[in-house]
Image: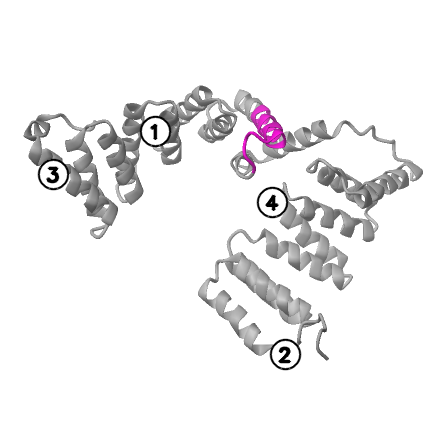
């Protein structure tokens, strides 16, 4: 019958296309999720589960696969397995409202009222406007806890709840600060609130662990997003002082010095990167660009030559070197200039 909305169960051409996507990109979580969702909609639950589990063993950034597998188990009323996978998805991407919401619902259905209420509170803290159904479930859960003898909790204002959640998150796992930097523009009020909370957590961690360079690196990233470039540079340089081979911190310093209008300092840090990682093509190219912009033609040409030493057919380095060699030929005095260091 035409006009039906259901998916045909034996569209093998579509299945083959989706499986080919998985074969050509086995580390892409999206390909695994698309195939699994299609199998699920086709009613082939066992195969959907197999596809998800295969994806989890091979794909990168597999939170979406954990989430879908959790929903699949929930649909089969296997709530313990559903909770396990949904909890993993939320742990990997803790700022995803839908992951926390679904985890809370599964815990509620499984009779874990206290855990469900706590998860609902976390989910509510991630959105400016809590959906009416979620607010209703939260109130029902809190009432059930009170009736069971639990002491009622005075819910603080939403912004503070969100900030407290972010602070506790970064305190448990400082690397989450880097993940929190991504996403919305820093001008977004919610994003700035999250960043300030992450900064507060990092400050406390640094006070207790002043010799940990990763904490200063995270602090530098957060300060940069907040527009505090001077503080960001100070934190990045502290990370480098504690670990002179901290390549990521050196690259961050390059970007920060460029933002502050100090190309010479940026080039100095970029040179450090090329010394620590001589096979990083992008570092040589960036150093060449920085030196060229400062008029240090001979030094820039040398940086491009090193880039070509890493990759002989690098068009960007070849074109940059050709332009600079032409300039040197017209102005031989440039050849007497000092080196980049």
| Quarter the C terminus occupies | top left
Gap between marks 1 and 2, in whole Å?
Answer: 59 Å
Give 234 or 225, whichever is nearer the viewer.
Answer: 225
**Residue 203 found in image quarter:** top right
Q: Which mark is residue 106?
A: none
Give 192 or 143, whichever is nearer the viewer.
Answer: 192
* Marks 4, 2: nearer the viewer: 2
**Residue 67 found in image quarter:** bottom right
Give 144 or 197, whichever is nearer the viewer.
Answer: 197
Residue occupied by mark 2: 10
- The residue at 58%/78% (across/down) is 12
Gap between marks 1 and 4, in whole Å?
Answer: 31 Å
Question: Can the viewer see residue 53 in this picture?
Answer: no
**Residue 9 found in image quarter:** bottom right
Residue range corresponding to the magenta coloring: 184-201
Gap between marks 3 and 4, in whole Å?
Answer: 51 Å
Gap between marks 3 and 1, in whole Å?
Answer: 37 Å
- The residue at 24%/36% (across/down) is 288
């Amino acid at each position: 019958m035409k006009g039906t909305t259901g998916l045909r169960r034996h569209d093998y051409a579509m299945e083959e296309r989706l499986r080919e996507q998985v074969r050509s990109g086995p580390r892409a979580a999206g390909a695994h999720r698309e195939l699994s969702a299609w199998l699920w909609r086709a009613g082939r639950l066992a195969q959907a589960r197999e596809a998800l589990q295969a994806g989890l063993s091979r794909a990168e950034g597999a939170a979406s696969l954990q989430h879908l597998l959790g929903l699949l188990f929930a649909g089969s009323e296997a709530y313990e397995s559903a909770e396990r996978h949904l909890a993993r998805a939320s742990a990997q991407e803790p700022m995803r409202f839908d992951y926390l919401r679904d985890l809370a619902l599964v815990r509620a259905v499984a009779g874990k009222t206290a855990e469900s209420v706590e998860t609902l509170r976390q989910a509510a803290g991630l959105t400016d406007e809590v959906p009416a159904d979620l607010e209703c479930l939260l109130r029902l859960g809190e009432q059930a806890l009170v009736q069971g003898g639990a002491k009622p909790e005075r819910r603080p204002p939403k912004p503070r709840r969100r900030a407290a959640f972010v602070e506790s998150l970064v305190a448990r796992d400082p690397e989450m600060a880097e993940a929190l930097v991504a996403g919305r523009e820093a001008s977004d009020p919610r994003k700035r609130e999250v960043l300030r909370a992450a900064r507060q957590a990092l400050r406390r961690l640094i006070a207790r662990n002043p010799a940990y360079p990763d904490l200063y690196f995270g602090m530098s990233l957060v300060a940069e997003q907040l527009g505090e470039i001077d503080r960001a540079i100070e934190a990045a340089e502290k990370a480098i002082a504690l670990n002179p081979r901290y390549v990521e911190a050196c690259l961050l310093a390059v970007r920060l010095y460029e933002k502050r209008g100090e190309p010479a300092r940026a080039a100095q840090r970029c040179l450090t990167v090329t010394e620590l990682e001589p096979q990083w093509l992008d570092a040589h190219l960036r150093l060449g660009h920085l030196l060229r912009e400062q008029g240090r033609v001979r030094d820039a040409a040398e940086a491009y030559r090193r880039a070509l030493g890493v990759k002989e057919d690098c068009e960007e380095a070849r074109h940059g070197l050709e332009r600079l060699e032409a300039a040197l030929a017209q102005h031989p005095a440039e050849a007497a200039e000092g080196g980049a260091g």
